[in-house]
Amino acid sequence: MFGNIQTKSVLRKVSVALPAPSKQNLKSSSAPPAPAQAKKNPIPSPLPQSVTKSSRPNTPQRKTPSSKSANGSSKQSLVRKAVKRKASTPPPQWDSSDSDSGVESDLSFDSARKRVRSSASSVDSSRTLLDRSHPWQGPPADYPLAHAADLVSSDPKSRPAFREEVATKIELQYPSNSKRERFYLADSVESDGFKSIEDIGETVRFVCANYLPAPEAAKASDEDTGYERRLTRAFKGSEGDPLEYKQVIDEYNELIEKRVKDGTIEKVLAAKHGLSFDWVKRILDQVYSRTVSPYVDSLKDYQNGTDFVYGELLYALCSEMFKETGLRSDQVFVDLGSGVGNVVLQAALEIGCESWGCEIMKNPCDLAELQAEEFSQRARLWGLSVGKVRLIRGDFLEKKEIGEVLKRADVVLVNNQAFGPDLNSKLVDRFLDLKDGAQVISLKSFKPEGFEIQERNVNDPRHLLKVRKLEYFSNRVSWTDAPGNYYIATKDPTDLIKFQNSLARKRRG
């Protein structure tokens, strides 16, 4: 089905200059992985590094930080931790308890089976997950995609996952009428690097659990005879047989392709109205690993003494924020200071809402655009309909498009952890344009605790905000493992109007 299982091409190690990032999707132009050799042998390279301009973009240009300002030291520490996320397929967290999300799958596992912990997203009955914008029948669609094989073949730190001289190439079928993704059975030697075996196993597991009818899903996901278990046995921690591993993939591909063609997957997906948290994370991890992870070091650049510091809110915290605000698929989400676009894409996928982001720093903007392009293709690959995504470059206080969308926004996110008082004050003025009932999520409160309406400060716009203080648990943000707080401010003029009416009556006398 796939032609030759192995390709015996071996390249010498070469050093090349990579092009600047572009909106082009990653395309393969390098040869398959070559055998790893001892350092004494200068001829073969562990993996080819001959990458052309059409293969993948280069790390964005970085500037060397200048001398520290008064607060430069703390911000530099923030940045160092803010870019630590790199691995696309971290070890799953296991939980022996049963989870019944009502979203992920109808299948019932054996009670003794340990499952990945799933914090299910709320079901939105008005949302349909099925992508109806592309045909589900006919010839498989071929479109630009950052294949895992391209990622591996251009990484000099990747090695064949099995004990073989040349990494076996396979293709993986997704639950849509699309051509398959190409993989080499190779893993990075770095602990946080890309692991093809993990990526394949996780993908197979989520497809079997979410896209097949309950009886067939139970069989495909069986803890002893299911595809994921058989792949694990065939791998045996690199001691297994790549031919056996490929045979399991072939059987899985045949089943999923058959269920796409006979309309089964389309029917199953059409009946769903929400995604589990782990399902969301699987797709976003794929997008991030193929676009941001190779260039994550470029995000360490920041400007001393400014508000331009990069940090990420992790998936779990964003999901909690969506739930606390009640964000729905028919609403509008805006992220002011959106970085590489993680939260914008998560809202579009997890909630299905119209999702906007604005970022001023060049490197995050470049990677955000790569992510957005790959995200749309990944959503199509998984057969999913997602919310409209719009990313804006520039200052969110000045961009006309942001001013207009804020008038329609239902939920606004501002990661103002490192923002100074002046910028926070200007943001409060910007919130005057929000409609009543709009909610603003922030890491620092825009309204001091105990700040009460008085005659001398009655015109302060902060009185329009009703603030809730919430706690987030550990490992929820990229710059620290510690727990912390975030705030949700709702624009509600009720108290201010009451005070103004009372003040008017008092003056009339």
Image: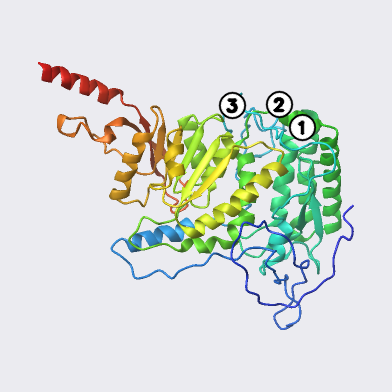
The residue drawn where x is 15% and y is 29% is: 455
Q: In the drawing, does residue 134 fall left or right of residue 486?
A: right
Give residue 248's position: percent from left, percent from top: 84, 48
**Residue under numbered circle 1:** 266
Looking at the rendered structure, the number of numbered marks drawn on it comes to: 3
Q: Amino acid at mark 3?
A: Asp
Position of residue 30 relative to residue 251, above or below, is: below
Give residue 407's position: percent from left, percent from top: 42, 34
**Residue under numbered circle 2:** 271
Looking at the rendered structure, the secondary structure element under dot 3 is loop
Give residue 395's position: percent from left, percent from top: 41, 51
Q: CA distance from mark 3 to mark 1?
A: 19 Å
- Looking at marks 2 and 1 on the same chain, the residue that comes earlier in the sequence is marked by 1
**Residue under numbered circle 3:** 124
Give residue 117's position: percent from left, percent from top: 60, 39
- Looking at marks 3 and 1 on the same chain, the residue that comes earlier in the sequence is marked by 3
Q: CA distance from mark 2 to mark 1?
A: 9 Å
